């Protein structure tokens, strides 16, 4: 995994990086449209896919460099099948757990600032090369002095201060992307999305909140077949979080190994059961369920990671949400009671 020696933190630098990327996207899109216009023969699907891949590469490169809000956008877009073409989404999917890490000096500085000493003193072993990196921070393998195997999450320096300015850049990027596809949401939807992203990101930059969430879910999740790491209290703080190290494969790698259909079915059932258990029983959900936050472990259990973004659900919402399910079945499978489903969508404020 390549390292990123410097992470831009100033508003001016980050805006310049985003501006350059926007210019590149604009130039490529104009060039593509021009070639379409002057071509004497119909444009086949391959050039379109190549064009989308190039745009996806530009977007992922700049968002990976900016991290924070920018990478959250990558993660979000990678899961929205109705917004962007698959070729772009596949590129952005790497943001779930494959962002280039920051360098060793920044990691050491952040740990000293948060925990009061160097990694060499705090841990029996500490691998300064991150094995996973995403939007808010990156994760390092370590061993505590009591021989506990740890995953240590270190937040990127200065992320909290970039949220507001990044959201403005994201709005501009959304506008630009809307010019390359007819599927992009309308402005009111984007505005709601931006507000939600800002609130959740402000929560996620405080690892004390995530530690509390981890403890809560470990205490309350009683479903068999799920593993939630324990927090290592003495080596955790606001911007450093140490927890049990879970080993396994991310969903993408697991699927690449061609598991049997029965194994796929079992995993799908686990994901389904966990979601509804959280909704109906706990009334609290992990609101950041992208593929990078799940590990398929060797014993068949499912490791659950990253509880920085958690939402509590009201009794009324859970009741209305549950009532909506049979209406979805009626509408989409039996083509009846469509008006009832529309009323449920409106009651839950999914649509106006």
Image (spheres, rainbow, N blue to C red):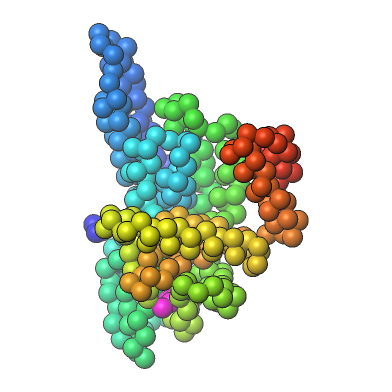
Residue found farthest to the bottom: 146
**Residue at 33 percent of width and 72 percent of height:** 298
Q: Is residue 72 visible?
A: yes
Q: Which residues are magenta?
A: 240-244
Question: Where, quadrant-wise, is the C terminus in this rendering?
Answer: top right
Describe residue 182's horizontal placement relative to residue 329 as left or right: left
Q: Position of residue 246 (x, y in %)?
A: 37, 74
- In this view of the protein, which residue sits in the foreground, 301 or 82? 301
Describe residue 227's horizontal placement relative to residue 41 as left or right: right
**Residue at 30 percent of width and 22 percent of height:** 32
**Which quadrant of the view contains residue 336?**
top right
**Residue at 30 percent of width and 66 percent of height:** 130
Residue found farthest to the front: 334
- In this view of the protein, which residue sits in the foreground, 155 or 230? 230
Describe residue 233's horizontal placement relative to residue 107 as left or right: right
- In this view of the protein, which residue sits in the foreground, 248 or 190? 248
Q: Position of residue 25 (x, y in %)?
A: 35, 31
351 above or below 263? above
- In this view of the protein, which residue sits in the foreground, 141 or 159? 141
23 above or below 291? above
Q: Position of residue 110 (x, y in %)?
A: 39, 70
**Which quadrant of the view contains residue 180?**
top left
8 above or below 336? below
Q: Position of residue 254 (x, y in %)?
A: 32, 59
**Which quadrant of the view contains residue 49?**
top left
Q: Is residue 203 visible?
A: no
Magenta-drawn stretch, dominant element (helix, strand or loop): strand
Question: Where, quadrant-wise, is the N terminus in this rendering?
Answer: bottom left
Q: Is residue 98 magenta?
A: no
**Residue at 68 percent of width and 51 percent of height:** 321
């Amino acid at each position: 995994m390549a390292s990123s020696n410097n992470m831009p933190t100033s508003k001016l630098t980050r805006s310049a990086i985003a501006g350059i990327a926007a210019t590149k996207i604009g130039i490529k899109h104009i060039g593509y449209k021009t070639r379409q216009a002057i071509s004497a023969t119909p444009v086949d699907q391959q050039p379109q896919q190549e064009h989308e891949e190039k745009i996806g590469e530009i977007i992922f490169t700049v968002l990976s460099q900016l991290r924070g809000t920018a990478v959250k956008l990558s993660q979000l877009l990678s899961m929205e099948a109705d917004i962007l073409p698959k070729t772009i989404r596949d590129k952005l999917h790497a943001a779930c757990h494959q962002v280039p890490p920051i360098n060793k000096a920044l990691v050491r500085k952040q740990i000293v600032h948060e925990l009061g000493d160097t990694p060499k003193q705090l841990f029996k072993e500490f691998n300064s090369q991150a094995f996973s990196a995403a939007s808010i921070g990156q994760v390092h393998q370590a061993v505590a002095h009591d021989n506990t195997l740890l995953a240590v999450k270190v937040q990127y320096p200065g992320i909290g201060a970039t949220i507001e300015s990044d959201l403005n850049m994201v709005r501009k990027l959304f506008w630009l992307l809307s010019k390359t596809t007819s599927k992009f949401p309308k402005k009111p939807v984007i505005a709601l999305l931006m507000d939600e992203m800002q609130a959740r990101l402000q929560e996620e930059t405080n690892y004390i909140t995530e530690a509390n969430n981890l403890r809560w879910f470990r205490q309350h999740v009683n479903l068999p077949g799920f593993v939630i790491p324990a927090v290592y209290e003495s080596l955790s703080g606001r911007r450093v979080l140490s927890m049990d190290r879970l080993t396994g494969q991310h969903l993408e790698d697991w699927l690449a190994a061609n598991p049997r259909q029965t194994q796929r079915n079992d995993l799908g059932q686990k994901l389904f059961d966990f979601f509804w258990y959280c909704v109906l029983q706990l009334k609290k959900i992990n609101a950041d369920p992208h593929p990078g936050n799940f590990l398929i472990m060797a014993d068949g259990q499912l490791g659950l990671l990253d509880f920085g973004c958690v939402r509590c659900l009201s009794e009324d919402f859970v009741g209305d949400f549950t009532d909506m399910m049979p209406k979805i079945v009626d509408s989409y499978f039996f083509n009846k009671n469509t008006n009832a489903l529309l009323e449920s969508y409106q009651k839950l404020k999914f649509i106006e």
